[in-house]
Each structure stands twice: as C-alpha cells, then as structure tokens.
Amino acid sequence: MRLATTAIALSMVGAVGAACGGGSGIQDGDSSQNSSSAGNSSGNGNGSSSSSSNGSGGGDSGFGEGGGLDLGGNSSAGNSGSGASTGAGDACATKTSEAGFQQVYLAFAFDVSGSMGANDVEWRSKALKWDPVVAATKQFFLDPASEGFKASLTFFPGAGGRRQMCIRDTYTTPDVPMTVLPSPAFGEAIDAVTPPDDNSWRIGTPTAYVMQGTVDFIEAERQLNPGKYAIVLVTDGYPEQCGGGADSIDVVAESVNEARASDISTFVIGVDSPQVEGAPPSLANLHQLAEAGGTGEAFILDTGNAAATSAAFTAAIEEIRGAAVSCTIPIPPAPDGRTFDKQKVNVTYTSTTTSAPTGLGYDQSCATESAWRYDDPANPTAIVLCDGTCASVQAQFEVSLGVDFTCEDVIEVPL
C-alpha cells in the first residue's frame, strides 16, 4: 500500500447553512441540488441498521490502528458543488476543506550485535544476515512510498561496552533523529556503524534497555510533536549480556506492554539465523513481544538465501507501512470560519474497488460494521474509523474518505 497516495486522496466536504439573502452573501453553484452528496444512505444515521458487530474498539491503538500522514490539513476552500434550497429561502453552501491524516512517527531500534554478521561461525554470516537486511532497510528509508512518514533510528547495543549498553539513558537520543522520509541520512548512519572488519562488531543484545530508552525518547518527542508513534524493533536474538532480569524476554515484554499502554505500538522484525549446525533456536520468542506491542505476530525472516531475506524484509516493512495508515482524521475548520455542527456529518468511503461512495455509519461505541466515531463526542476534534472500517482502508491501494457537513441533523451524538 502506498500511503502517500492514500493521504493525497483524502478530502473533506463542508456544507453549512447560510441565509440566502443575508449574512455572507455567498452563492455557490446551482441551488436546485441537494448539497449532501452522501445522502441518507444505510450507512448514515446512528449506525443501528447494521446487525453484525466488529468489536467495540476503534481509534489509534494496536496493530493497523496507528497514526498516518500529515499532509498539512488546512481550510483552503474551493467550490465543490451546489447549494440546496430549503423551501424557507435558506441555502446550504458547499465548500471543500482539505484535511491531513494524523502524523505517524516510526522509531526504529536496530540490532548491530556481532550475531548479525561477525562471520566467526557459519550462522553469523554477514552475507546472509547483515547485508540483505541492511540493503532492504536502506531502500525503505529512500523509497518514495515512505513519503510523509517521519522516522528515527537507534542502534543497539550502544557503543561503550557493557557499562553503557545496559543503561536505558544510552538509547534516549537516537543515532538519527526524527527525520522526514525519504532521506539518505539513515543509509549513511548504517554505513557508518557497519564494522570495518569481522573483529569490530559490538557484543550483546540489551533489548530491554533499548526499548525503555526508545519509549523515553518518544514520550519527550511527542510533547513537542503530537501524533501517532510506533517502535519498529529489528533484532536477531534473545536478550543477553546485561544479566539479571534484563536478559529475560518476559521483562522485555513488560516494557513493550507499558509502551502500548501509552499508545505506542511495537512492530517486531526477527532476523533468524541460517539453519546450520550450531545455530541458536528459532526466534519464536519475538512473537511474545509483537503480541505485547499490539501488532499480532513478529515478522520472522528466514536467512538461508540473501535475495529471499531482502525480499522478505521488504515485504515485512511494506506491511508495517500499510498498517500505519491513519484511522484518525482531524476535523478541519468549517469553511469561511463558520461553526462546525457535530450532528450534521456524513462520512463516505471510496476505493479502487468501489464505483461510488459508500456511506459509513456513525456509531460512537463502534459496535456496528462500517462505522466511525468521534474522538470525543462532547467536543470532537477528529473522526476516528472503527476497527473494521480501519482494516478496510488499510487493505486498499488507494482510498478516499469524504466527510460531508450537511445542512440538517443526520446523526445523533451522545452527550
């Protein structure tokens, strides 16, 4: 899924009441047509017409519900349709206000320990592990399809030996700060950290500490730059070399779960070792981290063939990128500075597989299919797609979402 395409397709259509002969004096199009382009389809109203349930969730927590792309939401208006005669001499002017997805930030934690390519034993082959994974990673950061994302990159273990690598503060400042993608800065940083010879690799896998430090970084970062944050952990091993509980996968899972509780999802890409004599056990333990992070299962890469490994990493990162499509759409200012009315809203959904817009139902509890809700029904600032709707959006190559601000109440929002 190409997220840039998805974001560009988003528009919001605002229709607000205006007196025909007074007030602003705006005349927009043919007043003989109805300005609510979505109409009152089965998806509108309070969502009660749908009998099946997709769960009670919704919003931006967990796999596939991360934030999305910020393309500079603004209220620059363009005439998009017609006014509607009310029979009482009033008209409903329709204008378009552009809106952007919520910004998504991906904080990469990247394993640079010796097991990724020290070449001292067969299963630590640089050609089979480090080289293909690095090639695919660099491509992601340079890929035009990543446009609109922001990302950071933190290597672990940190330089400075065991004293430094087993401290969370070592990882609160990433090696590449939050940077707009695409960018060559990440590839340059990877080249710089790649050991010049087989004897210069870093030793240890302080997974618990890099997760804790990365969460600390995100907590500070989003105070300045609100949005949806997620961690992408790339590693080839079990936690080790820090001693005590820090080498337990359960302790790492606790840190991941705490991050999720703070609305920070964790995606996991496991770089498995070639299945040769002496190789460590499979990385099935990493599924525990992905589950704790709200992203289902870890992506486990088979590293028996370099080309296949690179392709598998690319597929994994593409799926992660698709799962980060925004399910939260900030509400733009009403056209011409008019007052937004939360009960005069229709939401429609159009994709490459649909010939016409499909109405989505409003359901604040997200208990019905094809539904959306407000982030805060008392004082809404954003439209949030419920789980099933969000999954449908993420599965499409190109999607547009129409939000019609109608002239009459079409939904009932609970107080």
Image (cartoon, rainbow, N blue to C red):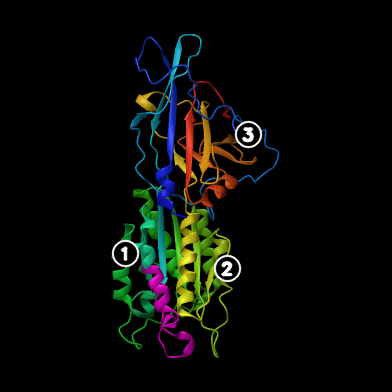
Residue that extends furthest to the front in the rendered view of this protein: 355
Nearer to us of marks 3 and 1 is 3
- Which disc is residue 276 wearing? none
- Compare marks 2 and 1 and give the one earlier in the sequence: 1
Binning the other alpha carbons within 10 Å of mark 1 as few (below 14), some (14 to 19) or many (20 upward) gives some
Compare residues 382 and 247 and report the one nearer the observer. 382
Q: Can you identify the residue that label 3 sits on?
A: 47
Give the number of marks: 3
Q: Is residue 3 covered in magenta?
A: no
Which stretch is magenta? 111-138
When the figure is inspected, residue 4 is found, relative to residue 266, above or below; the finding is above
| Disc 3 secondary structure class | loop
When the figure is inspected, residue 397 is found, relative to residue 274, above or below; the finding is above
Quadrant in which residue 306 is drawn: bottom left
| Disc 2 secondary structure class | helix
Q: Please say whether residue 377 is visible from this viewpoint.
A: no
Q: For the residues labelled 2 and 1, say whether their Cβ atoms are less than 8 Å apart.
A: no
Binning the other alpha carbons within 10 Å of mark 3 as few (below 14), some (14 to 19) or many (20 upward) gives many
- Compare marks 2 and 3 and give the one earlier in the sequence: 3
Task: Identify residue type, mark 1.
Answer: Val
Nearer to us of marks 2 and 3 is 3
Q: Can you identify the residue that label 1 sits on?
A: 176
Q: Position of residue 352 (x, y in %)?
A: 51, 46
Residue sitting at x 43%, y 60%: 215
Task: Identify residue type, mark 3.
Answer: Gly
- Compare marks 3 and 1 and give the one earlier in the sequence: 3
Q: Can you identify the residue that label 2 sits on?
A: 287
